[in-house]
Image: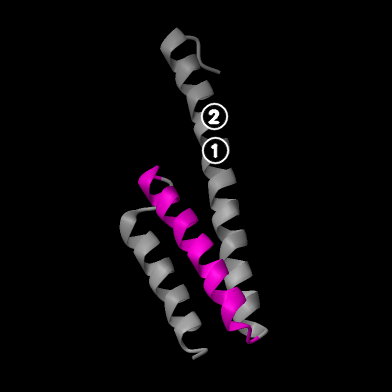
């Protein structure tokens, strides 16, 4: 266990950030699953609506540093491709 005050603070800050990042990652995964479910159900309108929400969530996660920008771009690109194949 840390004895130095600054080390104790770092432990607390890390716990808070880890919890926030975990929550954001979970929300992104849920939005991705919604898009994939709509695509599987062959529902183009629902898929496009879900895609719009997923892109928003992924972009926010990238801007907060939860995901690297290339990772976010890759996720968005893959989702967009599967939705566009419904046409």
Residue 78 position, x and y percent, is 43, 75
Mark 2 — residue? 16
Give the magenta range. 42-65
Q: Is residue 47 magenta?
A: yes
Residue 6 position, x and y percent, is 42, 12
Q: Considering the image in quadrants, where does the N terminus appear? A: top right
Q: Residue furthest left?
A: 70
Mark 1 — residue? 20
Query: Is 8 rendered above or below residue 51?
Result: above
C-alpha span from label 2 to label 1: 6 Å
Q: Residue at x 50, y 33 (%)?
A: 17
Q: Residue at x 51, y 62 (%)?
A: 54
Q: Residue at x 43, y 81 (%)?
A: 81
Q: Secondary structure at mark 2?
A: helix
Asked if the residues shown at circle 2 and circle 1 are in contact, with their CB atoms under 8 angstroms apart, the answer is yes
Tell me the quarter of the picture where residue 22 sits.
Answer: top right
- Disc 1 packing (10 Å; few <14; some 14–19; many ≥20): few
Q: Quick one: 66 or 49, which is closer to the camera?
A: 49
Residue 83 position, x and y percent, is 50, 81
Q: Is residue 45 magenta?
A: yes
Query: Is 85 rendered above or below residue 51?
Result: below
Q: Quick one: 63 or 4, which is closer to the camera?
A: 63
Q: Is residue 84 left or right of residue 28?
A: left
Q: Residue at x 58, y 37 (%)?
A: 19
- Disc 2 packing (10 Å; few <14; some 14–19; many ≥20): few
């Amino acid at each position: 266990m840390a004895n130095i005050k600054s080390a104790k603070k770092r432990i607390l800050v890390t716990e808070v950030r880890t919890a926030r990042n975990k929550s954001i990652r979970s929300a992104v995964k849920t939005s991705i699953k919604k898009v994939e479910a709509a695509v599987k159900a062959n529902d183009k309108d629902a898929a496009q609506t879900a895609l719009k929400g997923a892109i928003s969530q992924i972009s926010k996660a990238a801007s907060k540093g939860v995901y690297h920008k290339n990772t976010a771009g890759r996720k968005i690109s893959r989702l967009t491709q599967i939705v566009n194949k419904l046409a």
